Image (cartoon, rainbow, N blue to C red):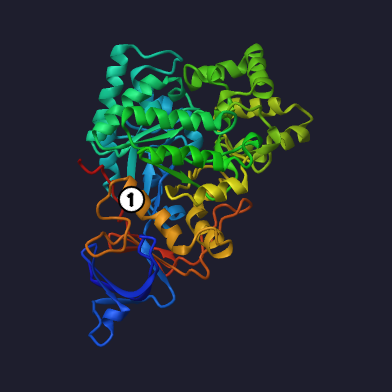
Amino acid sequence: MEQLVVRDADVVDGTGEPSYRADVVIDGGRIVSIVKEAAAAGCQRPRAMRELDAEGLVLSPGFVDMHAHSDLALLRDPDHSAKAAQGVTLEVLGQDGLSYAPVDDRTLAEVRSAIAGWNGSGDDIDFDWRSVGEYLDRLDRGIAVNAAYLVPQGTVRALAVGWEDRAATPDELDHMRRLVAEGLAQGAVGLSSGLTYTPGMYAPDAELTELCRVVAEYGGYYCPHHRSYGAGALEAYAEMVALARQAGCPLHLAHATMNFGVNKGRAPELLALLDEALAAGADITLDTYPYTPGSTTLAAMLPSWANEGGPAAALARLTDDATSERIRHHLETVGSDGCHGVTVEWDTIEISGVTDPALADFVGRTVQESADARGESPWTTARRLLVTDRLGSTILQHVGHEENVRTIMRHPVHTGGSDGILQGTKPHPRAYGTFPHYLGHYVRELGVLSLEECVAHLTARPAARLRLPDRGLVREGYRADLVLFDPRTVAAGSTFADPRRLPTGIPHVLIDGRFVIEDGRRTDVLAGRAVRRAPL
């Protein structure tokens, strides 16, 4: 690994302090020297086997995607420019309570089916792991960017209890505790939940609290997708804050948005709730993506009782006319818990991807638009998609509010997370654009955050949550996971119309001191590895 000096960079070091001009020397995968302009005056400047002229570029720590769905994409796609080109040097996987470890043969098949819309069917993947440690070992064979992992509580519940809506027995709860402890001992950084997804949503607070006690013992954190982002959102946030405090466990709120019409303009109420808890000593952080629409699977909209028993049981209910009518009533009249307690608005639900190519005409249209074109009810259209695509369809849900997005991103405990689903013909542009969109749109164009503040939100703050002692700052001795970008031109290329376009203004990205993006092009370097939880 050759020595490199990055010459005349404007260093934004992740601390939030003003930038400074410096030469930064990298050797052996670490930052070995930082020579500020004032210090360099009148003395010999550092030399290296290779020099990079960074005039006009900002040098910052690599960005940390605190909420990623690249669990299989990192194995499937060695290029992974969707994240590497954004300057992401670390992703946190295992989100929303559903991922691929720990599993046995039964639950692996169930999970693959349940989240095919997030990660694909996995038919192109050799699932040669079952435990968390084995999955991390698989990542260690070489991936595009670094990755950390959260033990997924829904997967744990599926393994110990099943997909039924019932309380765990004492023995099953002990089994879940052991599974969480084993995952953390093997290197996971915490526990995630998806409390609007089955089977994780069937867990009562007492069960979640017991699992969080285990997480706290290992120095991890709890990352819930909580029970509602719509009706009852504030109550759901308060529930998670109280639960984590009771367990003595650090809390990281996943994609902390306030969506749907009932929450327009209510972000200050959420932040007041968090500020009160922080003032009382709670350890809380959160992440958001800088867009208004959300993204998930169409099947996630269903009421929880319709998904009980797993994907096969859900499909059986959808094909039964009487049960299908009950589902429609819950969605359109009652307000499904899968749709955050609000009644579904079919004109806000855009199909972003399908697994069956024969259904491609639905992509890019809302369910309402497709139904109108066919002269049928929206539920008839949605039901056809769910059954024919075997629950694999992904959606964009246009239910957010820009003022809420801006208000939350200003908060001092905020971090960045793409929540990027890479599947589908027209995925959410956040998968390819989150980090440059922060820097270009919200920093340069709108001034919602200063450049120094924003970089701290995307680097040092998430590294601190992950308890990484040598990442997240431009500092001597730290790992050389670094981004060079042009603050005048950095921008997301991805749009809702063309979501897979790569960003502009990010010519260089280094991981472990090696170029994964060089002169704006992806190299063949696979410098990423599993980042395991630091021991207490």
Amino acid at pointer 1: Ala
In this orientation, which residue lies closer to the viewer: 115 or 27?
Answer: 27
Residue 61 on image: x %, y %: 35, 60
Left or right relative to 184: residue 108: right
Instruction: Inspect this view and state whether residue 442 appears.
Output: yes
Residue 154 on image: x %, y %: 40, 26
> Residue placed at 25% from the left, 29% from the top?
181
In this orientation, which residue lies closer to the viewer: 343 or 148?
Answer: 343
Look at the numbered disc 1 and give the secondary structure of its residue.
helix
Quarter containing the C terminus: top left
Quarter containing the N terminus: bottom left
Left or right relative to 43: residue 162: right
In the rendered image of this protein, does residue 335 appear above or below residue 26?
Answer: above
In this orientation, which residue lies closer to the viewer: 89 or 477?
Answer: 477
> Residue placed at 42% from the left, 47% from the top?
413
Dot 1 alpha-carbon crowd within 10 angstroms: few under 14, some 14 to 19, many 20 or more: many
Instruction: Inspect this view and state whether residue 103 appears.
Output: no
In the rendered image of this protein, does residue 290 appear above or below residue 152?
Answer: below
In the rendered image of this protein, does residue 127 appear above or below residue 309?
Answer: below
Residue 363 on image: x %, y %: 64, 41
- In which quadrant of the rendered view does residue 182 lie? top left
Residue that carries the numbered disc 1 in the rendered image: 463
> Residue placed at 26% from the left, 36% from the top?
134
- In which quadrant of the rendered view does residue 319 lie? top right
Residue 374 on image: x %, y %: 76, 32
